[in-house]
Image: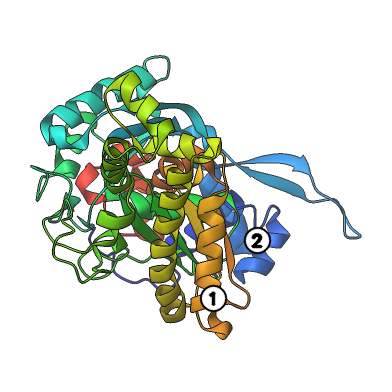
Amino acid sequence: MPRRPPTAIDQYEALSTVVRLVRGDRARTRPELGTTALLGRTVISQRVEEAMNLGLLEDADVGPSSGGRAPRRLRFRAEEGLVLSAVLGATALDVAVTDLDARVLEHRHLEWPVARGPEETLDFLDDQFADLLKERAPGRLWAVAIGVPGPVEFATGRPSQPPIMPGWDGFDIRGRLQDRHGVPVWVDNDANLLALGEARSTGLDDDQHLIFVKAGTGIGAGVVSQGRIHRGSKGAAGDIGHARVLEDNSVMCRCGRTGCLEALAGGWALARDAVSAVHEGRSRFLADAHHATGEITPADIGRGVVAGDAWCLTAVARAAERIGSLMAALVNFYNPDCLVFGGGAVTGGDNTFLRVVDHTVRSRALPLASADLTIRASAAGETAGVAGGAHLAVETLLSADALATWAPGGRPSAVEPARLAGGA
């Protein structure tokens, strides 16, 4: 997105600040806006009026009086627009429609292997999106956000050498979806969107740091630093699943390398080892599951943990220790406030995984780095990723640069999508 030339008094910086403060519930009245944003009464009044004309703010109830006339509170009009958001995984995807506050209006979790390739997958997504909008006015659509299970060149919206996404490398996801839907599109790594959704839903302060670890079929991490996603120079930040943690060339990963964390502790690796356990008679629980369906899935192992199956408990604990060992090194390096885990490994109804991770991190990380560290399961639930995608899109559209582009036309759809999609 091209940068606008600087102005003496930048109305769009002030407009963006006002709308974001109200949207984030950090200032609700005009006096609070002036105090928080360090802007004069006239500027606040002008920018609030402009935001109201754009349909972004409106007067709401009356706030408490501090001695004079009680101030009128402002409300962000989240219903003014819609965002379509999807997060692809190795074997399933989540798709949703949200309002401009990233509140999920409708959500679906569907089985779909990403290995079917970009054309089939995006056609399938188009059908799902169309169905989600069927009972809603399509003119309210503001943006689309997509998360994929691999590195993304964020500036172009193209996957960059994704290890488990055959046929996706360099595919123009953004261009394909912008042509189809006529709105700006953001494409990011799935763990990044999970991290952002977690940070926003739990009210993480802008001066805090969070690492979100997705431990499911594969393993990945998203980093939020001072309110922003950290992606690295090539979009590969957080790709911990393919860090080499074992000097053993016999342990082959799906990425083609050996000794990767994912090849030892990912859900697909546990399912691989579970088949051997069944053939060797080491798990009656998994043998019954295999007999019933002809296969073993990571979910079967999770159910085995809940049922107290010894092999499942040991396998999950060993995987948690390996993940925790790597995270201890990252805690020393990055010193986050919060280490959050999501994915199938922590949603099976048993706390074995988190208990072992917590013990491993705290016993191996430096005391200074782990002293005030919070280690917990995701509080945002199964919609964290789609909500994170919506936050990414809306926060970018409400930035000063984006507002300067679309506000003169009245709404984002008034300009070419390619002029709005970009970094945040």
Residue that appears at 38% across and 21% down: 132
Residue 33's tag is 2
Q: Residue 421 at x, y = what percent? A: 26, 50
Name the one closer to the observer, 18 or 228: 228
Q: Earlier in the sequence, mark 2 or mark 1?
A: 2
Name the one closer to the observer, 212 or 297: 297
Residue 102's tag is none
Q: Residue 364 at x, y = what percent? A: 49, 77
Residue extending farthest front: 281
Q: Which residue is mark 1?
A: 363
Q: Residue 191 at x, y = what percent? A: 36, 53
Residue extending farthest top: 135
Amino acid at the residue labelled 1: Ser
Residue extending farthest right: 67
SS at badge 1: helix
Q: Is residue 108 visible?
A: yes
Query: In the figure, is residue 92 to the left or right of 256?
Result: right
How far apart marks 2 and 1 lie (CA) works out to: 45 Å
Q: How many marks?
A: 2
For label 1, count other residues whose C-alpha is less than 10 Å away and answer few (under 14), some (14-19) or many (20+): some
Q: Residue 138 at x, y = what percent? A: 35, 23
Query: In the figure, is residue 137 to the left or right of 43?
Result: left
Looking at the image, is 408 positioned above or below residue 195?
Answer: above
Q: Is residue 55 visible?
A: no
For label 2, count other residues whose C-alpha is less than 10 Å away and answer few (under 14), some (14-19) or many (20+): many
Quarter of the picture holding the C terminus: bottom left
Quarter of the picture holding the N terminus: bottom left
SS at badge 2: helix
Residue that appears at 16% across and 44% down: 165
Query: In the figure, is residue 350 to the left or right of 120?
Result: right
Amino acid at the residue labelled 2: Leu
- Foreground disc of the pair 2, 1: 1
